[in-house]
Structures are given as structure tokens and as C-alpha cells.
Image (spheres, helix red, strand yellow):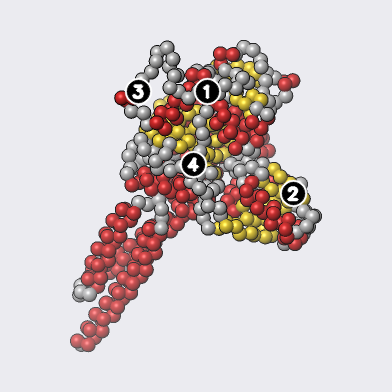
Amino acid sequence: MENEQKKKRYYRRTIDLMFLFVLLIVYIYAFYKAFNFSMLPDKYVFMALMVAAVIYLILFVLALQRYPTWFVVIKRIFIVLLCALLGTVGFFLRKVESTTEKIATVNSTAQTKLFILTRSDSNIDSIEDLQGAVIGYQNGSDVASATYMKNLIENEVSGTQAYDYLDYTSLYSFLTNGQIDALAISEQYYGMTKATQEGFDEKVKTIHTFEKEAEQVENKIDVTEDVFTVYISGIDDAGSPDQMARTDVNLLMIVNPKNNHVDMVSLPRDGYIPNPALNGFNDKLTHTSLHGIQNSITSIEDFVGIPIDYYARISFTSVAQIVDAVGGIDIDVELSVCSYDESQNRTHDELESHEGQEVVCAQQGKNQHLNGAQALVYARHRKTEGYGTEGRERAQRRVIMGVINKLLSLNALTYINNLLEVAPNFIITNMPSDQITSFINHQLSDFQPWTIHSLISDSGINDRQQVASLSTENGPYDVYLFSQEEIHEIMNAYDGAKKLMQLKDFSFDLDNLYENTPAISDDPNLVWSSMSGVVY
């Protein structure tokens, strides 16, 4: 009898130790991920490790003691739940890391993949079959990857013809309709195109995959210490944000990480500024992006007089997706708006014909709760007389602030998983992934509330002028002429953040309010609000 009791105790203890061994393996996995997860401050990881070690020690001691069966069962259930929790944490940390790398068009990962696509019904099945084929390459935001693939293919196959275009969305369309025979595309944009193009797997196939060592990008800015500017560009077409399209949203975020302050500058889409791609002739700001995101950045930098360090680009589809991912937003709605639901991925013809689209409404009022479709309808509306483009830009700022407020709320962690599913398909940025993680790590290490100040371009005037992108025969066109005062205000915000001016150093001259402000551009081609009424 005594021997049987000893056998039972030995068996029970062995089972408990096996449970603890499994828990130890999960511990090693989870904390390996945590220590290599650069977003998490080390102090928090060490604190968690200490707590986990104490729990493990207690469980180990309990495994060596005799307890009633019910207690043993509860202990084992606790170990299983702890394993599930830590395993989920490890998986989640890897998912966050992966998403950050996908969003960042420039990252520090060891390798990236590059694909060659052809139509599913094509006779081209390998890279050797590309001889004489027309191959599409993107020469916009992903030009470095395209150039790399072009050189590799030309070295391996003779007689290919290069077809360069600014965006992958158009190139994918050219591939599926037979205008080109193959498409060279990088890993990030492959995933984005697959997510936004219906029937992708049925229409195209991958015939070859290259691997490339990722270039290490020198970080000239420390985003935890230095003031930096982010250009947020929102295009007014559905699908991938890399496509060549007009920008509806043009925001500059002047970020001061030391003071936890952001100046958010809203630039009107019809702002009248020189277009570098068209020999510096004046154009609408929204048209500058038709020549690529870098063209928009150059035009804004030259006009406003401050550097743009990074950009983040979204397609309008992402507005609905992101708002839904955070559980909706609560904002003030200036007027009631109803329109067709454009929040789902549809073809251009379906959007134009409203095929299969429901009517969605956003009701006027304070602190209205909007889902993704409602937020999109509100953010895009500008047809009401007296509301126009200025009203739409106010709505866009409210939607963006609504999302930011959700992300800064106590419930933000409950939205993270949804955002991780959405973000890689609808957002791209040139901020390196290590800079993103450094910024988040810094905020988590010493979390302080942020202040956001909106700078609104509204002291200029609406006018009619010829624009470089459109025919003069149908002009002049509606544009917004900036005032020199609002440009001074933007420059002051950036210059003040850079200097971190102390109150004791503050001084001004009533006869020259802009004495200490960097000079605005003296380009004689610029047309200011004071020059309205004459078509230039």
C-alpha cells in the first residue's frame, strides 16, 4: 500500500515537473522575444522577468510538496494558462516587429525578397522565358528595388524591354490587361498589391524570386531627441498608397520629442505653389503628387522653407479601415452628410457606378460616434455650398485627431491587433523601422502626455489662376493663394521647436514682427494672396 502511495506521489511529481519544463521553454521563448523587441524598454522587461522568476520558483516549490488533488489540478491549469499567455505575448511581439518592417519602405532587416510576376495564363514560367518580354518596373517610391531587379534580369536574360511607370497599381493593371508581359515588384508592395487587388492569386503567378541584402540606412536624425517633420499624404483613390494619384490630405507634423509637442499644419489641396516636375511653374499642391511623393515633398520644402524628414502615405480606403480597427471615433461633425459607401475595395468602374454600394450618413452634432464608412464619407465631403475644400480639410483634421485620441486612450492596447492587420496594406512610410521602434521605446520609457497644436492655412484667399498640370484653354482654375503671414507662422513653429526658445530669451520688435524668423522664399514666380485678382 505504501509503495503504491509512493508511486502515485512520484508520478504526480513527474507530471508537475514536466509542466514546469514546458513553462520554462515558453519563458525562454517569450523573454527572448521581449529582450530582442526594441520597442520595449529594458526596465519593463527586467521587471517582468523578476516577477516571472518568482512565480516559477513558487511553482517549483509547490511541485515538491504534497497537496490535495483539487489543488494540483488548479496549479496545472494555472501553468497552462500562463504558457498560453506568454506564448501569445511572444507571438504578438513578433507580429508588431513584422508589421513595422512592412510599413517602413526603408528598414534595417537583413534581407528582402523581390518577385517577378506574370499572368496566370502566360507561357512565361521561368526567368529564362523572359527573353523579348516587356517587363514593368516602378520608378517612383520603390525605384531602388526596381533598378536592382532590372540589372539582375538584364544580366541573366537578353532582349528584355523595360516599361517604367510611377506606381505598382497601374503596372499591375497593365500586366493583367496584357500591356506588359511581366512585373518586377518588391516584397512589401507585393503584399500590399495582393491585399488591395481582387482575384490577385487567380490572375497572376510568381515565376522567380530574388533575395537582396537590405541597405543599412544612416540615421541622421535621432527621433528621441531631435525635432523632425513628417509629411502625411492622403491620396484620393482606392487601393495601394504607392499609386500615382492626387493628394486630398496634406499635413505636416512638426514633432518635438523632448517637449512632447506636435504642431500639425494643414495645407490646402488647392494651394498654389511651384511644381518642380513642371519646370517650377505654379500648380495646385494636389497635382504635385501625380509625379511621385518625392516631387510633393520637394515642392512643399521649397515653398514652406522647412525640411521634411519623413513621409507617411495612405490611400483613402485606409481611413475607413483604420477607424474601424480602433473601434470607431468620437468627433464633432460640422454638418450632416450622406453619400455612397466607398470604404470597401472596389474597381474604379464600380465606384463610379455605385454598384453594390449602400448610402452611409454622418449626422451633425457634437461628439458623434462614427464608424469607418461614416468617417470616410465625412472626411471626403466638400460639395455643400459654403463648406467646400476648407470644410473638408477641417473634417479630415478631426478624423485624424479622433484616431490619435483613440490611440492615446487607456483602451489603446485593445486596438493594437486590429491595427496590425490593417496597417501594412494601406500605409507606407520612409521612416526606417529602427527609428520607429526607437521613438516608441522612448515614449514607453518616460510616458508623458502630448500636446497637439493645429496650424490652419486660412489667412490666404481663394482665387482663379492657370495651373501647370491643366490646359490653359479651360482655365483659369480655382486655387488657394497663401498669405506670407501663414508661411511665417509655419516657419516660426519649426524654428521655435528647433531652438527650444526659453521665455527669458523671447523678444520681438513691434515694427518688424518677423525679424527673428527665417526668410520666406524670394522666388519671383510665387503668387501670394496680396497679388490676387490678376491671372499670372
- Which percent across, then down, holds residue 91? 43, 58
Amino acid type, residue under disc 4 in the picture:
Ile
How far apart are the two marked residues, 2 and 4, measured between alpha carbons?
36 Å
Q: Which badge, 4 or 3, comes first in the chain's sequence?
A: 4
- Give the labeled residue for mark 2: 162
Choose the circle earlier in sequence order: 1 or 2.
2
Q: Does 327 sit left or right of 123 as displayed?
A: left
Q: Residues within 10 Å of mark 2 (few under 14, many from 20)?
A: some
* Residue shown at the point (57%, 17%) measured from the top left: 528
**Pick the front one: 67 or 400:** 400
Callout 3 secondary element: loop
Q: Earlier in the sequence, mark 2 or mark 3?
A: 2
> Residue 47: image x %, image y %?
28, 56
**Residue occupied by mark 3:** 506
Question: Which label sits in the foreground, 2 or 4?
Answer: 2
Q: Nearer the viewer, mark 4 or mark 1?
A: 1
Give the x, y percent position of residue 187: 59, 53
Choose mark 4 or mark 3, whichever is in front. Answer: 3
Residue 378 visible within the image = no
Asked whether 422 or 294 is in front, the reply is: 294
From the viewer's perspective, tell me whether residue 441 is left or right of residue 300.
left
Tell me which label, 1 or 3, sits earlier in the chain: 3
Give the CA distance from mark 4 to mark 1: 37 Å
Q: Amino acid at mark 3?
A: Phe
Q: Which residue is mark 1?
A: 520
Q: Are marks 2 and 4 in contact (CB under 8 Å)?
A: no
Quarter-of-image position of residue 535: top right
The kind of residue tagged 2 is Ala
Do the numbered discs 4 and 1 sit on residues whose CB atoms are within 8 Å? no
Disc marking residue 322? 4
Q: CA distance from mark 4 to mark 3?
A: 41 Å
